[in-house]
Amino acid sequence: MSQDIILETRDLTKEFKGFVAVSGVNIKVRRGTIHALIGPNGAGKTTVFNLLTKFLSPTRGSILFKGKDITLDKPAQVARQGMARSFQISAVFPHLTVLENVRVALQRRLQTSFQFWRSERSLDALNPRAMMLLEQVGLATFASTIAVELPYGSKRTLEIATTLALEPELLLLDEPTSGMGHEDVGRVTELIRKVAADRTVLMVEHNLGVVAHLSDTISVLQHGAVLAEGPYEAVSRNPQVLEAYIGVAA
């Protein structure tokens, strides 16, 4: 059973000058699943993500990735071990083309990102893999488009493509459908299902329709602690969860 767990937190806690943002969180993410982290605003979801990806250090507790304690590791170390994250705010290079954005991410994987003296032609070897990734996410026809000119939903899709370029075993998605219209939400939902076919996904998501459609397991946070956990059918009927979301007991 322990080999099925790709990511585990044990008593994960984060305090900010006496304020407890995350309190004793214990989560186990199974390989090959889509695991959603949900909760009301201020529940601590993004803080948990920042702890997992090492942008914050925990006050106490531990984080295990593939059975290895990564609590003291740096963000780059965690990324090299196979954990990659997208952010709630789209993080692409706006004045590079779509293809060039993916190529930058591929350079990171090859550890050549800062070899600025390399000629443009020498980077063309990365183009076939970059185009393959763009095909995978449905952006191949936008390869020569400057990223800033993309519609918002396509920018978020491009960010997923650049994250996939790192070939992660565990993909962390922070509010992947935030700010999207209905059509874009549907397209990105199906993209997440597609890319999860051969990897594990942990996502923070506010859209409960997306969560219900995609998730194998849901962990509900409230006031920085795990309130409930399980499949959507069980969690959505939990009286404590209903009270946390709509303010009245079921």
Image (cartoon, rainbow, N blue to C red):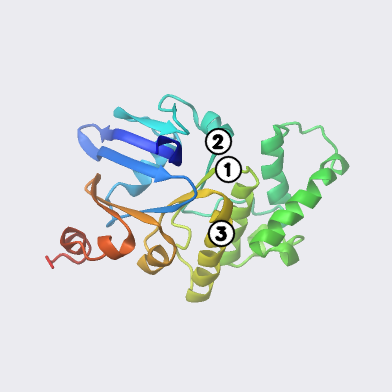
The residue labelled by disc 3 is 156
Position of residue 54 in the picture relative to residue 113 (left or right): left
Q: Position of residue 73 (x, y in %)?
A: 47, 26
Mark 3–mark 1 Cα distance, whole angstroms, equals: 17 Å
Cα–Cα span, label 2 and label 1 = 8 Å
Q: Are marks 3 and 1 in contact (CB under 8 Å)?
A: no
Q: Which quadrant is home to the C terminus?
A: bottom left
Q: What is the residue that sits farthest to the front in this orientation?
A: 1
State the SS at label 3.
Answer: helix
For the point 50% across and 65% down, the residue is: 189
Amino acid on which the number 3 mark rests in the picture: Arg
Against 71, residue 162 (above or below) is below
* Residue marked by disc 2: 79
Q: Which of the two labelled residues, at mark 2 and mark 3, occupies the earlier sequence position?
A: 2
Local crowd at mark 1 within 10 Å, few (<14), some, or many (≥20)? some
Name the outermost residue toward the bottom: 183
Q: Which residue is denoted by mark 1 in the rendering? A: 168
Bin the neighbour count of mark 2 within 10 Å (Cα to Cα): few under 14, some 14-19, many 20 and up. some
Dot 1 amino acid type: Pro
